[in-house]
């Protein structure tokens, strides 16, 4: 198993009305290259915070401890150019989640004078008062070995959100929205980028890609908009695709189509998939491994067969029991109301 | 006699000069104390039917009979009085309520508007309603935005039953809830149905939930009824194309070895 990203002791704290809310507590998790990993949890479990942390999208006010090591391989390939200033505040390279090297594990840092300058304190919960804004540029550290540069959102990570209407620009033709990603991250010319956009619309099976290039989001259905959002997310050929409740606002039939589409694209391109969802049954249909989150903690992690067939934790079992499937015993009988 | 009888209901919308038939000649009935599910994909017309039945919008054609009278002919004070018998719970109670209102305020409104209890008596009635839906009276002074999603949906149900309705329209009322909370809310709804003989018109896209709680189902596709009948008969062996597609798309949990059932 090749690791794509290694998350260590990740703790994320939000500040709200003067009080601190810990959204993620000391999460350690390895994401394997080319795997389909589902993150499951109810509201407040921290699953979306994890997705945002991995993508480097956490708000500046969030306090982040721990680190994520990336093993992206050769990302700076010829022709690819880093986005200049397009996404300055949402790239993990800004140090919100600092690229840490294996040569500087927390233990080595402890006692070091540099400690106070690092966002990771060896003392749990002990943060310097200078974290105001949540942003501390880490001292650049020389990476001795494997960990690669942090990923660029858009180039190395594609992100699909729940509501495609909110993630697409309502007044830009969808062809341009997809082409823009390809142009920015792959260094293509506009005509090349448009050709790529058309090809992507074919890949996400949007009917009539030629006219769809010129369509605006409001002219598409919810499912079609999500297909466009997926096309934009994969336009630069990311290593990792994050789908955060990407099918939750869609009806059952469209949801099944989008899940099938994600599965096909991920397989064809050898992408790693992080599938964030509240529906354990849906996750089980798509993922090879499932991580169950609750109240900001990782409760259980295992293969889909283990989690569904032989859950070790009571909470996982409770989640499975609460699922009302098509083979469930009708609740009507229990209430004395006969169908 | 049916509690609610809908016949030949039609509703058209105009969009960009084109007329779209959202509900096309739909007829169904709901008996006292039963749950009828309306299911179908987005755009099938199920929510439009709910809004027509509640008279939040007016139909282009058709007839709605509720408790033996022509519901569409009612207006003014008679409509208001009859509305007490026909309540609703929506998907998102935060959107349905004033978020800054207190729980007590939300429950006080129907008691006052429908003249159910005197001002002096209302606090006691509010406490009783909260207890009826599994909450405690000390929740009354809290603001709607402060309480959890599950508590909020219980308050929405308490408000719905405050006027002693014979029918409650549940428009995706459990769809946005966490699975563990969803189960509790369904249990509460079934308990209320059992105790108070309330009928439900359940709008949902979740066949698992429908199969679990509804007596009969009407499957809609593009504004028309594709199929209807006993819930388990329809869901276990759908005959219509849309029924088969919905069933095929429903996520399944294959719990092997460890599953005792």
Image: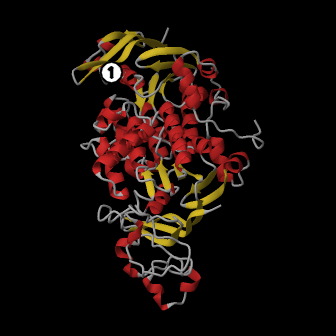
Tell me the quadrant of the picture where the C terminus of chain B can be found.
Answer: top right
- Mark 1 lies on a secondary structure that is loop
Q: Which residue is mark 1?
A: B55
How far from the left and from the top, in percent, is residue B205? 50, 30
Depth order, front residue of A102/B136: A102
- Number of disc labels: 1
Q: Residues within 10 Å of mark 1 (few under 14, many from 20)?
A: some
Q: Is residue B100 visible?
A: no
Report whether A308 appears left or right of B159. Answer: right
Question: Does A260 sit above or below residue A26?
Answer: above
How far from the left and from the top, in percent, is residue B211? 60, 26
Q: Is residue A201 visible?
A: yes
- The chain holding disc 1 is B
How far from the left and from the top, in percent, is residue B246? 54, 26
How far from the left and from the top, in percent, is residue B32? 51, 17
Q: Residue placed at 39% from the left, 31% from the top? A: A207
Q: Residue placed at 40% from the left, 56% from the top? A: A154
Q: Residue placed at 36% from the left, 24% from the top? A: B51
Question: Does A232 sit above or below residue B185?
Answer: below
Question: Does B64 sit above or below residue A197?
Answer: above
Depth order, front residue of B8/A249: A249
Q: Quadrant of residue B258?
A: top right
């Amino acid at each position: 198993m090749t690791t794509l990203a290694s998350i260590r002791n990740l703790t994320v704290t939000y500040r709200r009305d003067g009080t601190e809310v810990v959204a993620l507590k000391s999460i350690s998790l390895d994401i394997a290259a080319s795997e389909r990993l589902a993150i499951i949890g109810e509201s407040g479990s921290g699953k979306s915070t994890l997705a945002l942390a991995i993508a480097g999208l956490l708000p500046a006010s969030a306090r982040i401890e721990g680190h994520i090591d990336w093993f992206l391989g050769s990302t700076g390939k010829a022709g690819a150019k880093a986005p200049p200033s397009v996404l300055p505040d949402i790239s993990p390279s800004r140090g919100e989640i600092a690229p840490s090297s294996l040569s500087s594990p927390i233990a080595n840092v402890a006692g070091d004078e540099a400690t106070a300058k690092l966002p990771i304190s060896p003392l749990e919960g002990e943060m310097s008062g200078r974290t105001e804004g949540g942003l501390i540029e880490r001292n650049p550290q020389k990476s001795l070995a494997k960990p690669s540069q942090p990923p660029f959102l858009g180039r190395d990570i594609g992100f699909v959100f729940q509501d495609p209407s909110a993630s697409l620009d309502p007044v830009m033709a969808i062809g341009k929205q997809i082409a823009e990603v390809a142009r920015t991250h792959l260094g293509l010319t506009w005509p090349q980028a448009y050709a790529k956009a058309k090809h992507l619309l074919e890949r996400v099976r949007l009917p009539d890609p030629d006219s769809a290039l010129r369509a605006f989001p409001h002219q598409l259905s919810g499912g079609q908009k999500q297909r466009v959002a997926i096309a934009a997310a994969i336009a630069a050929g990311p290593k990792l695709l994050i789908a955060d409740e990407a099918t939750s606002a869609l009806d059952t039939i469209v949801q099944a189509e989008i899940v099938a589409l994600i599965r096909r694209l991920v397989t064809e391109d050898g992408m790693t998939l992080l599938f964030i969802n509240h529906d354990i049954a849906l996750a089980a249909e798509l993922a090879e491994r499932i991580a169950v989150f609750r109240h900001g903690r990782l409760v259980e992690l295992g293969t889909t067969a283990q989690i569904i067939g032989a859950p070790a934790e009571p909470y996982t079992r409770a989640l499975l029991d609460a699922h009302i499937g098509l083979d469930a015993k009708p609740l009507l009988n229990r209430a004395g109301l006969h169908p | 006699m049916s509690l609610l009888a809908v016949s030949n209901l039609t509703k058209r919308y105009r969009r960009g000069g084109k007329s779209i038939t959202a509900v096309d000649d739909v007829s169904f009935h709901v008996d006292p104390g039963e749950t009828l599910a309306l299911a179908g994909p987005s755009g099938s017309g199920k929510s439009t039917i709910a809004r027509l039945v509640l008279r939040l919008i007016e139909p282009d054609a058709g007839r709605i009979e509720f408790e033996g009278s022509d519901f569409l002919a009612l207006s003014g004070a008679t409509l208001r009085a009859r509305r007490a018998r026909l309540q609703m719970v929506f998907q998102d109670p935060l959107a349905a309520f004033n978020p800054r209102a207190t729980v007590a305020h939300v429950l006080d409104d129907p008691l006052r508007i429908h003249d159910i209890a005197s001002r002096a008596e209302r606090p006691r009635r509010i406490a009783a309603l909260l207890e009826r839906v599994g909450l405690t009276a000390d929740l009354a002074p809290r603001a709607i935005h402060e309480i959890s999603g599950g508590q909020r949906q219980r308050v929405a149900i308490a408000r719905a039953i405050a006027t002693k309705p014979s029918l409650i329209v549940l428009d995706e009322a459990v769809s946005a809830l966490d699975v563990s909370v969803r189960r509790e809310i369904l249990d509460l709804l079934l308990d209320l149905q059992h105790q108070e003989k309330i009928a439900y018109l359940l709008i949902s896209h979740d066949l698992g939930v429908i199969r679990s709680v509804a007596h009969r189902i009407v499957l809609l596709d593009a504004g028309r009824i594709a199929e209807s009948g006993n819930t388990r008969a329809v869901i276990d062996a759908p005959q219509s194309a849309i029924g088969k597609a919905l069933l095929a798309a429903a996520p399944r949990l294959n719990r092997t070895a460890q599953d005792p059932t």
